[in-house]
Image (cartoon, rainbow, N blue to C red):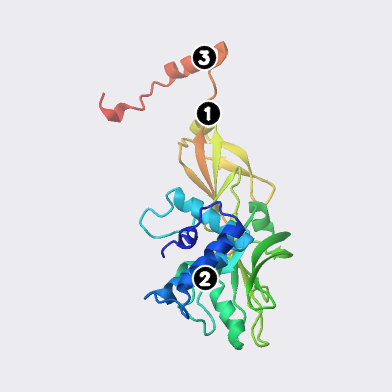
Amino acid sequence: MDFKDYYKTLGVERGATQDEVRKAYRKLARKYHPDVSKEADADKRMREINEANDVLRDKEKRAAYDQLVDHVARGGSPDGQFHPPPNWDEGFEFHRGPRQGPADQAEFSEFFSSMFGAAERRDAYRKNFRARGEDHHAAIEISLEDALKGAEREITLRGQEIDAQGGPEWRTRTFSVKIPAGVHPGQLIRLAGRGMPGHGGEAAGDLYLEVRIAPHAIYRVEGRDLYMTLPITPTEGALGAKVQVPTPGGGVVEVTIPAGARNGLKLRLKERGFLGKPPGNLYLLIEIALPPADTEAARNAYEQLALATPFDPRRYLGV
């Protein structure tokens, strides 16, 4: 979709005051209002002016819009089409999915409806039709431990609701969310009735929380599987060994390192990943860590090893 430059539409600078925005809107409205204007494109221009004014006159909307302006200024639309930055909606609630209700599709642009999701709701209240409330989507980031074991967390989301006059307004909601054990990245947690209110007595929509897992110091998430780098010594790799390994669910297991283990060898701990059908696994990626040669004894040991085991790792290079 195309990005809408609302400052350009109203002919004001980025730092314009609310009074300057109001004066610019009134001046343009007098020129392009369809009831008085003789301009050929008056109706289209008036819709654009109304849309720009709707965003820039509102403190919360303008603050959110300015973040998108900064994204575009940093080169966020390299192909000429606007793409919002990743995770820009985290901590906010915005309209998603198909439009509901007999909204006038021409009243607001695709950009406005996608970013602020107000057009359909405003029409819904004006036309007093009956419809289930819209579903909302938001993203939450949780720790790996909470995802594996389950938890109850308090979250705060900011989103639009409809005021008594049928217009959109920003409100902040805080509530508890029960995170089920085994929830994995990309999974949706449904909170029934936490979306937009219904119209004409119909039920409220739902709120869907998309789960995102915060980066972990030890484990890496891939689908339902977990990956962990397991450092071992050259001796353990050459001769084999039994080593202690922490598990994501807590506790420690003993793992057998086979003799002759090399860098990149992958060992599987079955069903130690996320719950599911089938459950995920924990994969250990072997990484041989060299002891530092920072003492005379260590250097002597390396020299003796070189004499005892003549080995050329570059022989396949033919040099």
Tell me the amino acid under the disc marked 3.
Answer: Arg
Residue 159 coordinates in the image, percent (x, y) = 64, 66
Q: Position of residue 228 (x, y in %)?
A: 55, 44
Disc 3/disc 2 C-alpha distance (Å): 77 Å
Element under disc 3: helix
| Residue 2, label in figure | none
Q: Quadrant of the C terminus?
A: top left
Q: Is residue 4 left or right of residue 226?
A: left
- For image coordinates 57% across by 13% down, the residue present is 295
| Residue drawn at the location 54% of the way across and 84% of the way down | 101
Report if residue 279 is visible in the image: no
Residue at the extreme left: 318
The kind of residue tagged 1 is: Thr
How many callouts does the rendering have?
3
Mark closer to the observer (1, 2): 2
- Give the secondary structure at mark 1: helix
Looking at the rendered image, the quarter that the N terminus falls into is bottom left
Q: Which residue is mark 3?
A: 299
The residue carrying mark 1 is: 235
Of residue 192 and residue 278, the one placed in the foreground of this image is 192
Tag nearer the camera, 3 or 1:
3
- The residue at the point 49 percent across, 31 percent down is 238
Observer able to see residue 172 = yes
Q: Are marks 3 and 1 in contact (CB under 8 Å)?
A: no
Q: Who is closer to the viewer here, 73 or 184?
A: 73
Marker disc for residue 50: 2
